[in-house]
Amino acid sequence: MNIHEYQGKELLKRYGVAVLDGYVAKTPEEAEAAAKKLPGPVVVVKSQIHAGGRGAGRFKDDPNGKGGVRVVKPEAAKEAAAAMLGHTLVTKQTGPEGKVVNQVYVEAGCDIKRELYLSILLDRETSRITVMASTEGGMEIEEVAENHPEKILKVAIDPASGLYPWAARKLAFGLGLEGKQVGTFVKFVTAMYEAYTALDMAIVEINPLVVTGAGEIVALDAKVSFDDNALFRHKDLEALRDDTEMDPKELDAVKNDLNYVALDGEIGCMVNGAGLAMATMDIIKLYGSSPANFLDVGGTANAARVTEAFRIITSDSNVKAILVNIFGGIAKCDMIAEGIVAASKNLSLSVPLVVRLEGTNVELGKKILAESGLAIIPADNLADAAQKVVAAVKKAA
C-alpha cells in the first residue's frame, strides 16, 4: 500500500526523523492559509499523487507550463495550488494518462547545501533489510545504479542486532558528511530504521535527503509503502489508503482479499499462487497474446471469491477470453469448479473460458465442469490451456 508524501512525513516525524513543517491543502484557500503559517521567504507547493517525478512532470492542460512542485513566495501559494488542484499531472511514473491532483502539500522552504539519497528496503538477494545511500540525491536511483553503481552505498542489517551505530557512521563517511553532521545522520537513519520495522514498511525512500546551510539533515521528500500482508497489524495505517489513487478494479480486489493488478492485454487470468500466475502470464505471451491482468485468488479460494474474481476480470472491456489455471491444494478443484460454474451463470459470461485444473479432487472438478452445460473449454496442462485461450481470442477477432 502506498501513501502520500505528507502522510509519510507525518509517520516518520513520530519516530524522530527530521522533516520540514508543512500542511496539506485541498483548496487554494487552504493552501493560502497554510503558507501564512510557515516562515518565509518562500514556501514549496507540492502536488500529492502516488508517483515520482512530480517536479519534472507537466499538467495535461498546460504541457509547457510549470511542474507539480513549485517554489513560490507565500502570497503566491494560492495561485500555485489553483494551478494544480483538479488538474491531471503527467510524470514518468504515471504513464500518459497521468493522475488528478486532489490535494497539495504546502511546506516550508529550505536552504539546500547538498542533496543526498537514502532509502531502506528489503534486499531479496541477501534476504536482509538494507540501507541504501548515495551522494547523487535528486536523481532517479535506477539511473545512478546504471551509470554510476560505485556511488551507491549499501549496509545489510542483521535482524538479530538491528542497525549498529558504526554501520550508520560508515554510511555517513561514505556520503562525505563531517563533524556534527555525522552524529545527526546516525540519529536520522536510526529513527528511519525504527519506523521501517515498527510499521512493517516495504520501502521508505528519501530523495532528496538534504544537508542545509546550517548543517542540518532533513527529509525533503518521503516515499513510503507498506507490506500489504502486515496491514492487519496496523488498522490505523489502512485508514491512510487513498482510494482515488487506485485503479477501481484493483481497489475492488483489495476489498475482496484478492491480489489483482490491471495490465493492458486481452486475456483475463485467474490463478492461485503468485508463481503460477507469473508462469501463466509468461506462457500466454509465448503463444502470441498478452495477459489483461495478474490475479491470484490465493490458496484458500472458495466459490464466493471465485465469483468476485470473475466479476473483476469481466469488468475490463479489453478482456476477450479468460484462462483459469488452478492447482488444487487447500483450495480443492471441485470447490473451484463449483465457483466457476456459479460465476459463469451469475455473470452471464460471454467470452471464451478455458479452464485447467490439477491437484486435489481434480477428476471431480472436471466432472462438475463437463456436466454444467456451459461452453467451458477444458485443458489438460498449462501449455494446452495457453494454446486454446490464444486460439479462442484469435478466432473471436
Image (cartoon, grey):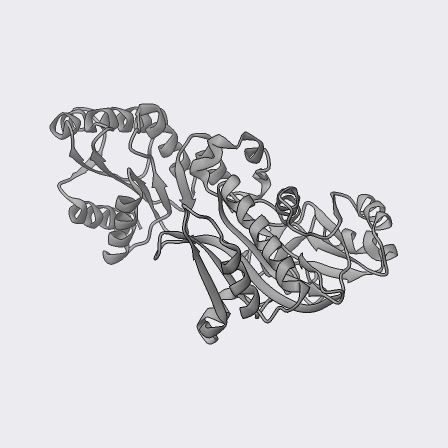
Displayed quadrant of residue 221 = bottom right
182 in relation to 245, above or below: below
Viewer-proximal residue, 183 or 321?
183
**Residue 177 versus residue 87 in the image, above or below:** below
Give left or right: position of 313 versus 352: right
Instruction: Give x and y (percent) for residue 174.
Output: 53, 69
What residue do we see at 27% from left, 54% from top? 282
Total numbered badges shown on the rendered structure: 0
The answer to whether residue 395 of the structure is visible from this angle is no
Note whether 104 is above or below 63 in the view shown.
above
Q: Position of residue 121 (x, y in %)?
A: 47, 53
Q: Residue at (58%, 44%) from the top-left corner? A: 3
Q: In the displayed structure, does residue 169 sit left or right of residue 79?
A: left
* Frontmost residue, 262 versus 392: 262
- From the viewer's perspective, tell me whether residue 184 is left or right of residue 314: right
Residue drawn at (26%, 26%) of the image: 341
Which residue occupies the foreground of this view, 129 or 52? 129
**Residue 28's spot in the image, x, y percent?**
80, 47
Q: Position of residue 84 (x, y in %)?
A: 72, 53
Q: Nearer the viewer, residue 351 or 134?
A: 134
Residue shown at 77%/52% (left/top)?
81
Asked whether the viewer can see residue 109, the reply is yes
